[in-house]
Structure formats: structure tokens, C-alpha cells
């Protein structure tokens, strides 16, 4: 779901060096987008609380603010962890010398600018001052975006099963990008879908866009394109308004170059004729980049939010990606209200197709069909997520959405084949006293990095180490201070009392 | 390995926070603001409020906001800008987002330095506020020194229930046409159907009301305000109150009853930190409040006094009709309740209470009975009539 999309972007951002972050946060639109898109809810609240505070927020104040129950503490640790990973929050000391948190200066300044407006950063896009001679409607933009994006999907799917032609051909650059991202692998002259390709296909559309864009980012940095330029333009795109033309005048050369590629993906629309070359229209794919609600026209603050209603009635070219159309019954039968070859071919990856009617196909999920999918590299979770994301409104009325028997059986079919899962990670042992061990395990669990605990051996296994090592360092410092204090007390026992 | 059990089936869904609707009621009573002009002028409050609103909108893409001015003689929408007949037409057409965007018939200047939704919101709000101020006439001011909070609360409640109804029922109420599902959903016009995360009824809109209050003396509209408060309590909509001036009688009750936050910025120093108060205490929505310890109103210090129904006086001890529970500040002349018309008798009110001689072995039970006879509510003569 959306979390996978933001998780992917988060993973990418995290490995950027600190200076890149400082440069990124110079743009208010970037600060706003990262704030809105990447942070968990409590972290947002925290940032907003500190934003206009003149002094750092001391750690003890934060501790009194958050409820002491387990869930809240866990949410707090996770929020702090992500804030620090994104270089938004820093440890510091307040006037009294206590440990405290403060926001990154660049981030705070930009976010404040975003909230109040002003400055001269022009990061929210420069709208064209002159009206377009041939204005472009939102319907047209939606159709364009869908056509372009589906062409990419067709290319990936088409490499799985031949005979699926796309309406438009995708450019050589995009094809190369898909190979770089290892969504398809070239064998001879024909492209073959890979495991990553299946993962890509089964994601919901917003996650797909981010997945592709991150590949784009990785490739672009090898092409001497500044990742800061690329990223801040992406975040700017997310803050633009649908149906308005923007001027290319303030874009850097890198960003000009990006426009071409993004038009290939269907994120922006621009005409190539001379008189309109200096304006571009963001499509819905772009304007929903930084929203939590993917491809949903709920930009309720913009006056153009109703475009999708008409787009939905387009029959075969209806945006099947954005509407639930699958019904799964407890007897493993599957009905999909679609006539478009793209979803049908995706369904055929893990279900046995049965009958095809003008607007409906029936299929059945069987052991062999699931096994075939698993051999191709699709996981049961992907199948389940896909079915859930695209479940018909009728199914959505019930909770859980999919019949539990089917969900469990799909998982069981997968487990039959695999008896072992491998995780890359770190084994932590010799933590110290039992109490310290418990604390460390609880912290790891709160961060969500704990995989397995071997209580008897006093060791545990985590997937990420950077946060844990920070934790142990802090623990060690605290311990040393405590010892030093005890020693000081022991040395001057009488003196201590006298001071009081 | 142990992943297959019933427990982790629905766990994936809970990642997305429900959108939150913040309805701000800004008390624009000119009399009260005139008194505050030195320490915190209205213009500064509006500027700070705008930052606060932007922060709220920034937190979640689907977050919405509405601002109502509770003026001296009327309650007025500041945002979204109400438009008249056209809007109904839109709704009939199936436009679900009746809220913010379409109502705004005013367009701000294009500014590349400001996030467009923020700019639109700010422009609409300031324009409407200015219009409200210019249409306020001197005679209308002189007639009423108070503010129409009851009207504003009612408007807020109506708006909230409309927005809430538009969101979660989108999936349940749409009629499904088996023969052609794509046309059915398109004709129903509910774009919300398309979003898997919104479809959960558990993920409906969470709403709250923030009252920025400067005037005291709300006793005129006691009944209306209390009704609005109880409606909020039922719908579990917290009413947060930020009091800048005036006496706090009913609003404190409002916050206490609905589980909202009540704060009184009494000193100029406290008022100077208006924005920080907003950002720290009032910005967290219900989802965040589950994890945070919110500034509690002074639990025991809540003023629970009521206003009488006959003279709108605030009373410590009053007379309550045993049938309809109306409150009166003095005994009724002919013993007939002004509201429900029931005939009531006063029992032994006014007489000196019979002093029961203190007994050594008198236990608590006995004493309770005795004291019960002394209160006017236990009007001995009639007993409680059966309803209907």
C-alpha cells in the first residue's frame, strides 16, 4: 500500500549523505513534501510542536508529553528514529545542559516558509502568466497519463506473455530504465519479466511510480545529474495543481532534461510545438506523488478535484488500476469486472482463467496457479495485497476484505515450498545484565528492527544496526555517568549531605 | 513460518491515519477585540491562525478545514466560501468534494513562493473576513454586545455531519449495478470508491472543533449552546477552547464534556505565545492524542454552573422542574413550569428545615435520608409522575 511506496523512498533518501539533505531542505516544497509524505503521524505532531519553539525541546519534556503506555512509547521511538534518519531532528543540549532535541535549521526554516509563504524560492512552481492558446482539459491529462503509464505496464507484462500490444510504444530511454531497474531482463532480443518486475506490477499505482522514479534517480546520478535537482523537482511536481500550466523558465538544465523523461512516464504533459514549449502541465500521476491518497482526486483544496468522474466511464480504457473490480469468493472463485487486457494478464499470473464475458472474466485460484506464480517469483503477500487493493466495493464492505480461508490458503501454498527465510542482519550478544538486555530488546522491537530473540542465550537478531549502536553508545555513556556519580558520592559522603 | 494465523490478517491496513476535519470558530465580536487591541489584535490572531491552519492541512493531504466567524449578530462562513444555488447543482451532479475547492469562487494571485492550497485558503479567508467587517454596521453593533456562538456551533455541527456523511458511506450507499459496474460507480460519482484506504468505515473522517473565544456573557443562548455541546458529545467531536478573554462558564463545560482541551490565556505574556499554544496543544488530532498527554483542563476547577431558563442568569443553586429538567433561578409564581406547563408544588421550600436532634448512634444511612428531605428537588407532595 502507500506505506511500501514511502518506505521505498525513505530507504533511498536515507542513504544520501548529510550535505545532500541540507541542500534538499533549502527548498520549502521539498521540506513540505517530506514532512507530509515520509513522517509517521506522531513525528509530524512533534515537528510542528517544535517548529516555532525558540529553545530546544528537552528529552525529559518529551517524555512527559508522551503517554507512558507501551504503544505510545513505541510510536515515539519510531517517530524519533525516522526523524533522525532523515536528518530532521538532532540531539543537542538546552540551556540547562540537559539532553534535548532540535530541528535541522534548514528544514525548520523551509517548513516555516512553506507554512507562511514568502521568500523568493519559487519552489512551488511558476504558473504561466499567459493563458494557453489551446487549453488542455483535465480529462485529456488523465487520459494521457493513463495511456503513458499503461504503456509501461504493458511493456513489462508483455514481456511475460506475448501478444499484448500496447497502444503507444514507450521510448528507448524508458525501456533502458526498466532494464536498469531489473524489472525486465533482456534475453536475446526479447524482454523477459523478472521477479522485481512482478513485484512492480502488483503494486498500486503510486508505489509503482515511486519505484520507477527511484530507479530513475539512481540512474540519473550516474549520468552526472545532480540528485538534489532531480529530487527537489519531483517534490515540486507533487505540490503543483492539476490542470494548470506551469512555466519552464525557472528550471535548471537538469530539470529541463527531466521534463522529457517525465513526459515519457506520463507525469507531465507538454507539447513539442514551438509556441508551447515553455509550458508544461503536471498530470494526476505527478500531483499525487506526495499525497497519502494515491491517484485519488481528493485534492480537496484545489478547485479542480472532480476530473476523474468522467474518466471512469470510458469503458475499456477505464482506469482499472484505480478502481476495485475483483470479487473473490470463499470457494476460490474470482470474478473480475474488466475488459482491459492489462488487468486480465496480471490476473492470469496467479489465477486460472475460466470464462470471458464482454465485461467480466471468471477465474479460479488453484494450487497449481499459485505455485506457478511462486515459481515465477511472485510472493503470496504480493498476490494478497493486489487482490485487496483492487477488491470490488462489495468486498470492501466486509472486514476482512478478502475471505480469510483464501488468504490463509494462498499463504500456506507458498509455505509448502519454502521452509527457510534468510535475513541479512546483526546478532547482538553479551548485552549485560538481564534488565539491560530486556531494555535493549524492547528498544529494538520499538524500532521495528527486531527479527528474533534468543532469550536463553541472551542474544538477539536485528536487521539494522545504526540505530542500535547509537542506543548502546547512549547507554554506555549513561552507565559511566552513573558510576562516576556513585563514586563521587562514595568519596564525599559527608560532603554531599553538607551541601544540602 | 508462523505467519499463518488469524492475527495478522488485518494488520496491514492500519498504517494510514484517518483524515481529520478541523472546524475553527473564531469569535469576531468587535467589542471584545477592541478591549484586546493592545496585547493581541485580531489581525495578528488571524495571521497566526492561518499558520496553524496551514500546519493542519500540511499534516495530511486529506485533512480539511472550515472556519466560521461567530460575529456579534450572526455566524458567517469564512472558509470554505459559501456559494449559493450553483453548489446544489454540483452536488446533484455527483460532485463529492462539495467542500473547499468548488466553493471558492475567488482566486488568489499566482505566487510561485506559496503552496497553492495554502494561498487559496488564505485568500478566501481574508477576503471573507474583510467582507464581514465591512458589512458590519454601527447599529447592529450597538444592539448586541455578545457573540452568536450558538449559531456558529450549530453551523459547524451541520457542516461536520455533512462531511462525515459524504465520506464513509461512499462505499456502503452506492448501489451496485451487476451488469455494468464501471458505469454504476461512475454514475454514483463517488471517486472515493477508488481508494482502498478510504473505504474502511473505521477510517472515516475524525472531526474536532476549535473555539477561539474572546467574549464572555453567553448566558443568552444557554440552551442552544448546551444542546450543541451534547450533540458534540454524542458524536464524539471534541470541542477545544482557547479563551483569550472573558469569563469561561460554558465553554469550560463544553471542553470538559466533550473531552476537548480548555486553556485560558489570561496574561499578555501568555497571549504573546498564541501561535505556540496552537501548535503544541491544539494541533494534534485525535489520532495523535491517543499517544500524547494533552493539557487537561483543571479537572476539578470546571465551572459547572448553569444559566436559568427564565432570566438567563447564571445560578449556583436553582430550581429544577422535575418533569422537563428546566432550570429556574427563583420559585415559580403559580407553580407551573414555564416550559412544559406541568404543575409543580414546592414542598416545604423556604421553611426552616426540621432539625433532627443529633443522635449518638445515627448512621450514615439515616442521615442521608434526613438531608434528602431538605432539598427543594425532593418536593414531597406529588412524587414523580409517570411519563406520558
Image (tube, rainbow, N blue to C red):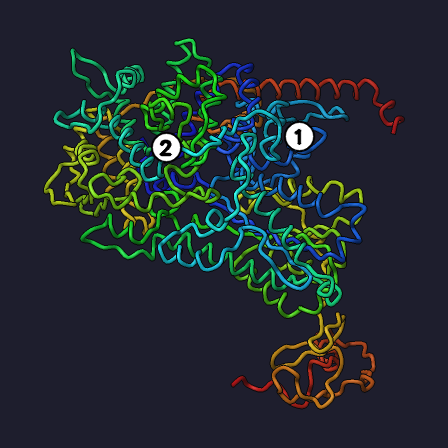
In the rendered view, would you say B176 is above or below B355? above
- The chain letter for the residue carrying disc 2 is A
In space, the residues marked 2 and 1 are separated at their CA atoms by 41 Å
Which quadrant of the structure image shows residue B333?
bottom right
Camera-nearest label, 2 or 1: 2
Q: Residue at x 32, y 36 (%)?
A: A142
Q: Judging from the image, what secondary structure is the residue with disc 1 in? A: helix
Q: Residue furthest left?
A: A355
Residue placed most toward the observer, B180 or B82 = B82
* Label placed on residue A144: none
Q: In the rendering, at what x and y percent does residue A119 appear?
A: 62, 27
Horizontally, is A280 left or right of B218 in the view? left
Looking at the rendered structure, whether the residues under marks 2 and 1 are on a common chain is answered as yes
| Pointer 1 residue | A59
For the point 40% across and 51% down, the residue is B96
Secondary structure beneath dot 2 equals: helix
Q: Position of residue A59 (x, y in %)?
A: 66, 30
Count of residue discs: 2
Q: Which residue is mark 2?
A: A285
Pointer 1 indicates a residue of which chain?
Answer: A
- Please indicate, yes or no, whether residue A460 appears anywhere in the rendered image: no
| Residues at discs 2 and 1 in contact (Cβ within 8 Å) | no
Q: Toward which corner of the image does residue A134 lie, by quadrant?
A: top left
Which residue shows up at 59% across the image and 67% down it?
Answer: B227
Residue A50 is left or right of residue A130, and the answer is right
Amino acid at each position: 500500500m502507500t506505506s511500501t511506496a514511502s518506505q521505498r523512498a525513505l530507504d533511498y533518501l536515507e542513504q544520501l549523505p548529510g550535505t545532500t539533505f541540507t541542500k534538499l531542505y533549502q527548498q520549502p516544497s521539498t521540506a513540505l513534501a517530506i514532512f507530509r509524505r515520509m513522517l509517521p503521524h506522531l513525528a509530524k505532531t512533534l515537528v510542528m510542536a517544535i517548529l516555532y519553539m525558540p529553545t530546544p525541546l528537552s528529552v525529559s519534556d518529551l517524555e512527559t508529553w508522551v503517554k507512558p503506555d507501551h504503544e505510545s512509547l513505541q510510536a515515539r521511538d519510531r517517530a524519533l528514529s525516522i526523524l533522525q534518519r532523515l536528518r530532521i531532528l538532532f540531539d543537542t543540549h538546552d540551556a540547562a545542559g540537559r539532553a534535548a532535541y532540535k530541528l535541522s535549521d534548514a528544514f525548520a526554516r523551509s517548513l516555516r516558509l512553506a507554512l507562511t509563504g514568502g521568500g523568493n524560492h519559487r519552489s512551488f512552481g511558476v504558473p504561466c502568466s499567459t493563458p494557453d492558446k489551446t487549453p488542455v482539459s483535465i480529462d485529456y491529462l488523465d487520459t494521457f497519463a493513463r495511456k503513458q503509464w499503461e504503456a509501461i505496464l504493458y511493456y513489462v507484462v508483455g514481456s511475460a506473455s506475448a501478444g499484448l500490444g500496447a497502444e503507444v510504444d514507450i521510448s528507448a530511454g524508458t525501456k533502458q530504465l526498466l532494464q536498469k531497474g531489473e524489472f525486465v531482463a533482456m534475453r536475446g532480443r526479447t524482454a523477459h519479466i523478472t521477479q522485481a518486475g512482478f513485484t512492480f506490477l502488483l503494486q498500486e499505482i503510486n508505489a509503482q511510480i515511486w519505484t520507477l522514479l527511484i530507479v530513475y534517480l539512481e540512474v540519473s546520478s550516474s549520468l552526472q545529474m545532480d540528485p538534489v535537482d532531480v529530487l527537489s523537482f519531483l517534490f515540486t511536481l507533487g505540490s503543483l495543481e492539476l490542470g494548470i500550466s506551469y512555466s519552464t523558465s525557472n528550471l535548471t538544465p537538469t530539470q529541463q532534461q527531466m521534463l522529457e523523461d517525465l513526459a515519457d512516464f506520463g507525469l507531465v504533459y507538454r507539447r513539442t510545438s514551438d509556441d508551447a514549449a515553455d509550458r508544461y502541465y503536471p498530470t494526476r500521476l505527478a500531483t499525487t506523488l506526495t499525497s497519502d491518497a494515491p491517484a485519488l482526486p481528493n485534492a480537496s483544496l484545489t478547485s479542480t478535484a472532480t476530473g476523474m468522474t468522467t474518466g471512469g466511464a470510458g469503458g475499456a480504457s477505464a482506469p482499472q488500476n484505480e478502481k476495485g473490480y475483483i470479487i473473490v469468493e470463499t470457494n476460490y472463485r474470482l470474478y473480475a469486472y474488466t475488459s482491459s487486457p492489462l488487468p486480465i494478464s496480471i490476473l492470469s499470473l496467479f489465477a486460472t482463467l475460466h470464462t470471458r464475458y464482454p465485461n467480466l472474466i471468471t477465474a479460479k485460484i488453484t494450487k497449481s496457479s499459485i505455485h506457478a506464480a511462486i515459481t515465477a517469483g511472485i510472493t503470496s503477500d504480493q498476490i494478497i495485497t493486489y487482490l485487496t487493493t483492487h477488491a470490488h466495493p462489495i468486498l470492501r464492505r466486509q472486514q476482512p476484505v478478502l475471505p480469510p480461508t483464501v488468504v490463509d490458503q494462498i499463504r500456506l501454498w507458498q509455505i509448502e515450498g519454502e521452509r527457510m527465510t534468510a535475513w541479512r542482519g546483526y546478532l547482538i550478544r553479551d548485552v549485560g545484565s538481564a534488565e539491560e538486555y530486556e531494555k535493549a530488546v524492547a528498544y529494538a522491537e520499538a524500532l521495528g528492527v527486531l527479527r528474533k530473540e534468543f532469550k536463553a542465550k541472551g542474544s538477539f537478531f536485528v536487521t539494522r544496526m545504526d540505530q542500535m549502536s547509537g542506543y548502546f553508545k547512549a547507554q554506555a555513556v549513561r552507565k559511566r555517568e552513573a558510576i562516576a556519580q556513585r563514586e563521587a558520592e562514595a568519596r564525599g559522603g559527608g560532603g554531599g549531605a553538607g551541601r544540602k | 513460518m508462523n505467519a499463518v494465523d488469524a492475527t495478522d490478517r488485518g494488520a496491514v491496513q492500519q498504517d494510514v491515519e484517518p483524515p481529520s476535519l478541523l472546524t475553527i470558530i473564531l469569535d469576531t465580536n468587535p467589542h471584545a477585540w477592541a478591549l484586546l487591541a493592545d496585547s493581541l489584535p485580531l489581525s495578528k490572531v488571524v495571521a497566526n491562525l492561518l499558520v496553524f491552519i496551514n500546519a493542519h492541512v500540511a499534516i495530511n493531504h486529506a485533512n480539511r478545514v472550515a472556519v466560521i466567524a461567530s460575529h456579534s449578530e450572526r455566524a458567517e462562513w469564512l472558509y470554505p466560501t459559501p456559494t449559493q444555488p450553483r453548489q446544489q447543482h454540483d452536488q446533484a451532479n455527483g460532485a463529492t468534494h462539495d467542500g473547499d475547492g468548488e466553493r471558492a469562487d475567488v482566486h488568489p494571485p499566482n505566487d510561485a513562493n506559496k503552496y497553492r492550497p495554502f494561498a487559496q485558503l488564505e485568500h478566501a479567508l481574508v477576503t471573507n473576513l474583510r467582507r464581514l467587517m465591512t458589512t458590519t454596521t454601527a447599529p447592529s453593533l450597538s444592539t448586541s454586545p455578545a457573540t452568536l456562538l450558538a449559531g456558529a456551533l450549530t453551523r459547524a455541527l451541520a457542516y461536520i455531519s455533512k462531511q462525515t456523511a459524504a465520506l464513509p458511506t461512499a462505499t456502503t450507499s452506492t448501489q451496485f449495478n451487476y451488469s455494468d459496474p464501471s458505469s454504476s460507480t461512475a454514475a454514483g460519482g463517488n471517486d472515493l470508491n477508488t481508494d482502498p484506504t478510504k473505504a474502511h468505515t473505521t477510517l472515516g473522517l475524525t472531526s474536532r472543533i476549535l473555539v477561539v473565544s474572546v467574549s464572555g456573557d453567553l448566558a443568552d443562548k444557554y440552551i442552544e449552546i448546551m444542546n450543541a455541546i451534547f450533540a458534540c458529545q454524542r458524536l464524539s467531536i471534541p470541542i477545544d477552547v482557547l479563551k483569550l478573554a472573558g469569563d469561561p462558564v460554558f465553554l469550560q463545560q463544553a471542553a470538559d464534556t466533550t473531552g476537548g482541551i480548555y486553556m485560558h490565556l489570561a496574561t499578555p505574556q501568555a497571549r504573546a505565545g498564541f501561535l505556540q499554544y496552537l501548535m503544541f496543544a491544539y494541533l494534534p488530532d485525535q489520532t495523535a492524542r491517543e499517544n500524547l498527554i494533552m493539557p487537561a483542563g483543571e479537572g476539578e476547577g470546571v465551572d459547572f454552573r448553569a444559566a436559568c431558563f427564565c432570566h438567563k442568569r447564571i445560578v449556583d443553586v436553582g430550581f429544577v422542574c422535575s418533569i422537563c429538567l428546566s432550570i429556574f433561578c427563583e420559585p415559580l409564581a403559580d407553580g407551573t413550569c414555564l416550559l412544559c406547563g406541568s404543575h409543580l408544588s414546592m414542598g416545604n421550600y423556604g421553611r426552616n428545615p426540621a432539625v433532627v436532634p443529633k443522635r449518638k448512634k445515627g448512621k450514615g444511612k439515616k442521615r442521608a435520608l434526613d438531608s434528602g428531605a431538605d432539598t427543594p428537588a425532593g418536593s414531597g407532595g406529588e412524587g414523580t409522575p409517570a411519563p406520558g
